[in-house]
Amino acid sequence: MPLAHPPGDAQADFGEAVVVIAGVEQKAHFFVMDLPHSDAYFVRAYPAATAEAWMDGHVHAFAFFDGVPQSVLYDNDRCLVSKIQPDGTRIRATLFSALQSHCLFRDRYGRPGKGNE
């Protein structure tokens, strides 16, 4: 099956890397947002993957891309989703809900444990 990414879709996640800052090796958490249709991406490092870092990453990515994507695909990070209902409906975390309502993008969620998503 061909993999296709329509314009306007983005993906966002946090990762970890060992970095050296001022000669000291330490762990950094990095926010990544990419636009798979164009292969454009944005990366920003933080001391921790907190809710505030998630929001700051979005704000800086949207400024970098000079716009807001129509939708963003996420894993089910607790900084974004406070609860998954039995029917699969997600209850957004308060801070993320405010950002999403202000920036007007649709949130979508993958299930990383499933190999087909």
Image (cartoon, rainbow, N blue to C red):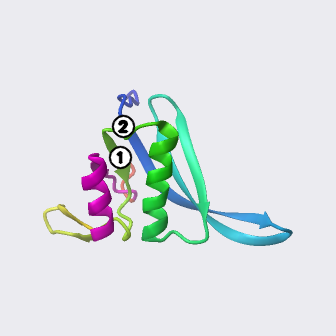
Q: Is residue 117 visible?
A: no
Residue 51 is left or right of residue 15, and the answer is left
> Which quarter of the figure has residue 69?
top left
**Residue at the disc numbered 1:** 72
Look at 38% across and 69% down and name the residue there. 79
Q: Position of residue 105 (x, y in %)?
A: 29, 46
Look at 37% across and 41% down and name the residue there. 68
In the rendered image of this protein, does residue 92 appear above or below residue 40?
below
Query: Looking at the figure, which quarter contains the N terminus?
Result: top left
State the SS at label 1: strand
Residue 65 is left or right of residue 20, and the answer is left
Q: Callout 1, which amino acid?
A: Val
Q: Position of residue 53 (x, y in %)?
A: 49, 65
Residue 98 is left or right of residue 40, and the answer is left
Q: Residues within 10 Å of mark 2 (few under 14, many from 20)?
A: many
**Residue at the disc numbered 2:** 9
Q: Is residue 92 magenta?
A: no
Residue that sits furthest to the right in the current view: 23
Among the two numbered marks 2 and 1 on one chain, the one whose residue lies closer to the N terminus: 2
Q: What separation in Å lies between label 2 and label 1 (alpha carbons)?
A: 6 Å
Residue bounds of the magenta highlight: 93-112
State the SS at label 2: strand
Q: Callout 2, which amino acid?
A: Asp
Q: Is residue 110 magenta?
A: yes
| CB under 8 Å between discs 2 and 1 | yes
